[in-house]
Amino acid sequence: MKKQVCIIGGGPAGLLLGHLLTQEGVDCVVLERRTGDYVLGRIRAGVLEQVTVDLMKRLGLDERMKAEGLPHDGFNLADGERLIRIDIKELTGKEVMVYGQTELTRDLMEASAGRGLEVIYGAEDVELHDIDGANPHVTFTKDGSPRRVNCRFIAGCDGFHGPSRQAIPASVGKDFERVYPFGWLGILADVPPCNHELIYANHERGFALASMRSNTRSRYYIDVPLTEKIEDWSDERIWDELAIRLGPEAAAHITRGPSIEKSIAPLRSYVYAPMRHGSLLLCGDSAHIVPPTGAKGLNLAASDVYYAAEALSAFFGKNDADGIAAYSDKALARVWKSERFSWSLTRLMHRFPEDGDFERAMQVAELDYIASSRAAQTSIAENYVGLPV
Ligand code: FAD
Ligand code: DHB
């Protein structure tokens, strides 16, 4: 098959890019290794920045988000007994949208056939070829038969473990990585949230986050050593730990219920640069990972896609290659700022095993400063709602 752009990966980055390019008249196909149901079964992000909401609006796919999403104008940092509210609306004029990655992906998936965006699920053994030049191609197998896509560009939207980044010769790029000594254990349950806003808590027993998907569905996280196994965490044990770490005020309002999903995700900061090599553009988790503290991962995927869609549309619509040449620098400028924010919020809100009294005193001092300074709160708020694209 011949396409202008072959997109590898049908997660949020790949589907968003596919829709934006289709809207601009660029002919593309999305190759996804898994089934649609499998992709929808992965419970991940829950907080969307304005940039992500705006892309859905531009596509005219924001109806359900407007009806079911929860706009939030603040969130809280908890330190022992104290709750520090960051009033993001008052400080920045903007808000964030609580709407699950699963729902956003579902909206994109359900609209693809009607809009002429071809998504091939169950595409196995995907390999990239000739990415250095102007005539790359992608091979894969579908139902046991070999297939091939000839194209002008490949968009690598295949997540951290996908084949796109690995297709770039080792001499070309550089990895930047920080692995953290803990993971987030998440629980999803059909119970009302304990608070109408998110709470990120730094307790002496560790980190906790109270989040939600709706007024009847809660999402909570605690940090655990990487050696922990999910089988050792009964629902009751998780609820007990959350009640301690979130503090007595929130604990009094926790409604317990059976988990509908629970899993442990490792935390990592990672950047691969450059984000383009020849005819291959990397978008989203294929090029970078942030620790989830601060809710930046999906939103960074969305801003990469914004720049990539602009560059590819100009290339095919106006024969203008400047956007392609500038893509990596533009995307990375925003990526590094989100990496910094996610890393610093992770540092502030978690107890690291190697930390001593001094490091803890620094956390307390920083939280004190944030509690008392509008400037510090504004800095956190503008990063949380998302820096401009
Ligand atoms: P992915 O979602 O990983 O999608 C990549 C796709 O490529 C997958 O569907 C995969 O099956 C496919 N693929 C892989 N290999 C191949 C192959 N060989 N061939 C074909 N297809 C392939 N982000 C936020 O912004 N806000 C949050 O609140 C937030 N919370 C999070 C909480 C948790 C617990 C976790 C784990 C992550 C969270 N994130 C959050 C991060 C966010 O989920 C990711 O950044 C986001 O999924 C990135 O999207 P993506 O499309 O780049 O990658
Ligand atoms: C959620 C995840 C995050 O990483 C975060 O910072 C806030 C909310 C969530 O899954 O709801």
Image: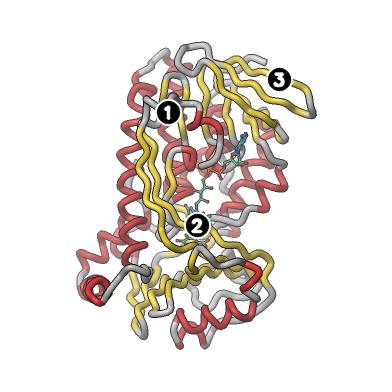
Q: Please say whether residue 53 is visible from this viewpoint.
A: no
Callout 3, which amino acid?
Arg
Q: In the image, what residue occupies the spot 33% across and 33% down?
A: 330
Callout 1, which amino acid?
Glu
* Residue 163 drawn above or below residue 384: above
Q: Nearer the viewer, mark 1 or mark 3?
A: 3
Residue 39, label in figure: none
Q: Which label's residue is closer to the chain start, 3 or 2?
A: 3
Name the residue carrying label 1: 310
Measured as percent of width and height from the top left, residue 258 is found at 69, 75
Measured as percent of width and height from the top left, residue 204 is found at 38, 80
> Quarter of the image holding residue 291?
bottom left
Badge 3 density bin: few <14, some 14–19, many ≥20, Cα 10 Å? some
Callout 1 secondary element = helix
Badge 1 density bin: few <14, some 14–19, many ≥20, Cα 10 Å? some
Report whether the residue tagged 1 is closer than 8 Å to ligand 1: no
Q: Please say whether residue 384 is visible from this viewpoint.
A: yes
Name the residue carrying label 2: 266
Measured as percent of width and height from the top left, residue 295 is found at 44, 57
